[in-house]
Image (cartoon, grey):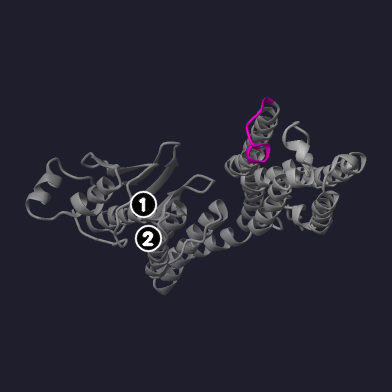
Amino acid sequence: MAKRRRVVRMSVELPLWRALTAYRLITMTYAVVLAVFTRDKFERPWVAVAVLAVISVWTLLTLPKVANARRCTKRFLGADLTIALTGILLTPLADAQAQHMDGPTLPTIWTAGSVLAFAIKGGWRWAGFASSLVAVVNIIERGQPSRDTFHNVLLVWVASVAIGYVVEVARASERTLARALEIEAATRERERLARDIHDSVLQVLAMVQRRGTALGGEAAELGRMAGEQEVALRTLVSSGLVPAMRASDDASMGAVVRTVEDDEASGEPELYDLRSLLAQHAGSKVTFSEPGAPVLLPTTAAAELAAAVSAALDNVRKHAGDNAQAWILVEDWPDEVIVTVRDDGPGIPEGRLAQAEGEGRLGVALSIRGRLRDLGGTAEVISVPGQGTEVELKVPRASRAPRTRVPRGKAGK
């Protein structure tokens, strides 16, 4: 039996959190040692002892908080930065000369650990916010900005923002790599399943279809059903999608409607895999071809595009006959998604579409072209009498999603 491949997720953040943990311990020790060697200059030593005691205890107790991003909460970050800023502001109370001689603050470079935690947790924007607060508090503590103060503040600000930006880039790269590994593993698994199923189930279904057709009568109906299941199973093993039966179309579209309603409530559009909607049409008379990776569109755009495809297939059934074959091809481009619906029917006579619109039969005009127009896309119908019809649907990536409830309009040409 073939072994299942497991995708191992790597974490580019873990080394950064470990480095931050070590940094906090080292800078805590440095602040304490520096205060011990300079204890004679403190006018109020008890203030320095209290501040450094709080910093030391806090650092040791919160080591688990800087172990990973999940444990490093916003509440912890706020408290940690507050302690650092308070230590800076209390420095003149312990050492009045530090304000005039550009001496180190009580927390010294331990403060940078709080800013780095913001950078690793939230990226460069969080880092800029935290380092700006540190800059303001340092200027308040000094009484007036000096060259050394400006130099130190600028160094912390640039370093933290740069680290935050690197973290954001690393996270994006990690997500891309993880997705690529998942697709590779899924592809290998589908290939294995396809080989196993082809050697067993698909051959049996194909034999039942042939024998049923040859026997006729009730056996012919059984053969037809076996043929439909063969096509559905081939779609499943080739794309990893479960092509639901036509009876479940409403349930699937209902799920999309609920997602659209959630989008409107939250104000943020979710992305939906167009393949899962179009795979439902696959059957003995409809061949579905799609990319191996998800084709993600805003929920409403995906539903409207799927409804336009459904309307095109309805036209095939109504006008090309029950025995007509149809093909659905999905193309995923960086700037647009193209879905082509083609059939081998008799085609549309020249001028027939314009005549249908003039008679008030607006199937193509509304159910197909109207939907694509609302999305900012286009629908082109190409037909040659005797050579079938091809409907090409194009939707831009930044589509204008209409604020509608995913209707499933069905109208003829």
Instruction: Find residue 264 and name its label.
Output: 2
Instruction: Find residue 23 and name its label.
Output: none
Query: Mark 2 or mark 1: which is in front?
Result: 2
Q: Say which of 86 and 380 sits in front.
A: 86
The magenta-colored residue range is: 139-147
* Relative to 78, 279 lies left or right: left
| Up/down of 42 relative to 271, above or below | above
| Up/down of 76 relative to 391, above or below | below
Q: Residue furthest right?
A: 37
User: Gap between marks 2 and 1, in whole Å?
Assistant: 13 Å
Instruction: Find numbered disc 2 in the image and state the secondary structure of the residue it sits on.
Output: helix
Q: Say which of 343 and 178 sits in front.
A: 178
What residue is at 41 percent from the left and 36 percent from the top?
Answer: 335
Label 2: how many Cα within 10 Å (few below 14, some 14–19, many 20+) = few
Instruction: Find residue 301 and name its label.
Output: 1
Label 1: how many Cα within 10 Å (few below 14, some 14–19, many 20+) = many
Q: Taking the image as drawn, is residue 82 in sight?
A: yes
Residue type of the residue flagged with mark 2 = Glu
* Relative to 194, 114 lies left or right: right
Q: Is residue 188 magenta?
A: no
What residue is at 65 percent from the left and 59 percent from the top?
Answer: 75
Instruction: Find numbered disc 1 in the image and state the secondary structure of the residue it sits on.
Output: helix
Residue type of the residue flagged with mark 1 = Ala
Residue 204: x and y, percent? 57, 63
Residue contact at pointers 2 and 1, CB within 8 angstroms: no
What residue is at 84 percent from the left and 43 percent from the top?
Answer: 42
Q: Say which of 212 and 204 sits in front.
A: 204
Q: Taking the image as drawn, is residue 212 in sight?
A: no
Question: What is the quadrant of the N terminus in the image?
Answer: bottom right
